[in-house]
Amino acid sequence: YKSFGKLFLLLFILSLPYTALISQNKRYQLYDDYIEKYKGIAIDQMKKYKIPASITLAQGLLESGAGQSKLTKGSNNHFGIKCHSDWKGESVRHNDDLNNECFRKYKSHHESFEDHSKFLLRPRYKALFDLKITDYRGWAMGLQQAGYATNKAYANSLIRLIETYELYQYDNKKYSGN
């Protein structure tokens, strides 16, 4: 049994580079297309509201499944924003953490991005605006800590998207005007 264990260990060690290669972040054309389509809106929102374009794009990618989710296709809701008590606009019902939850419905993609920016101006996200616009890691962690999403891996998912798709490039002075 000792030699079997050694052989198993050797095979395991030899397979690690292959496993690492498979699990490396892989780019998807669908995501690249989403970024190309919406990066201009995200940059405009960054200039207007001081929210990193990388964060806006990563949240849009994650929350909308790169624009493919039912909520996005049917309601232009790219960020999974629920109605909340102050919402006066149109809404749709969608299953999320609970069945039949109320989500905001928008007339356009641009309206969804604008509302997302205004949503982040709420007091619970105030501390994020003390961070540098290039600190996407801080923003991602802060969004998770402030309870933007219930997923415990939310910040890491945003960071992975930002780094895989090099979304941080849109936060620099060339785009932000700062």
Image (tube, rainbow, N blue to C red):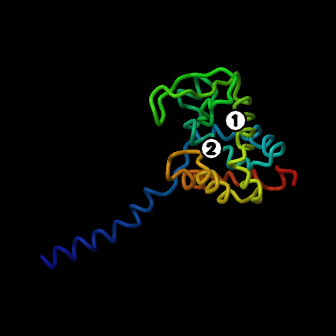
Q: Which residue is mark 2?
A: 59
Q: Nearer the viewer, mark 1 or mark 2?
A: 2
Q: Where is 88 relative to 115, above or below?
A: above
**Amino acid at dot 2:** Gln
Q: Is residue 6 left or right of residue 172?
A: left
Q: In the rendered image, which quarter contains the N terminus?
A: bottom left
Q: In the rendered image, which quarter contains the C terminus?
A: bottom right
Q: Is residue 99 left or right of residue 55?
A: left
| Residue drawn at 51 percent across, 26 percent down | 94
Question: Looking at the image, which residue sits at the far front?
Answer: 85
Q: In terms of secondary structure, where does tag 2 sit?
A: helix
Q: Which residue is mark 1?
A: 37
Alpha carbons under labels 1 and 2: distance apart: 15 Å
List x then y, in percent, for residue 37: 69, 35
1 and 2 marks in contact (CB < 8 Å)? no
| Residue drawn at 67 percent across, 59 percent down | 138
User: Between 111 and 34, which is closer to the camera in this rendering?
Assistant: 111
Question: Looking at the image, which residue sits at the far right?
Answer: 177
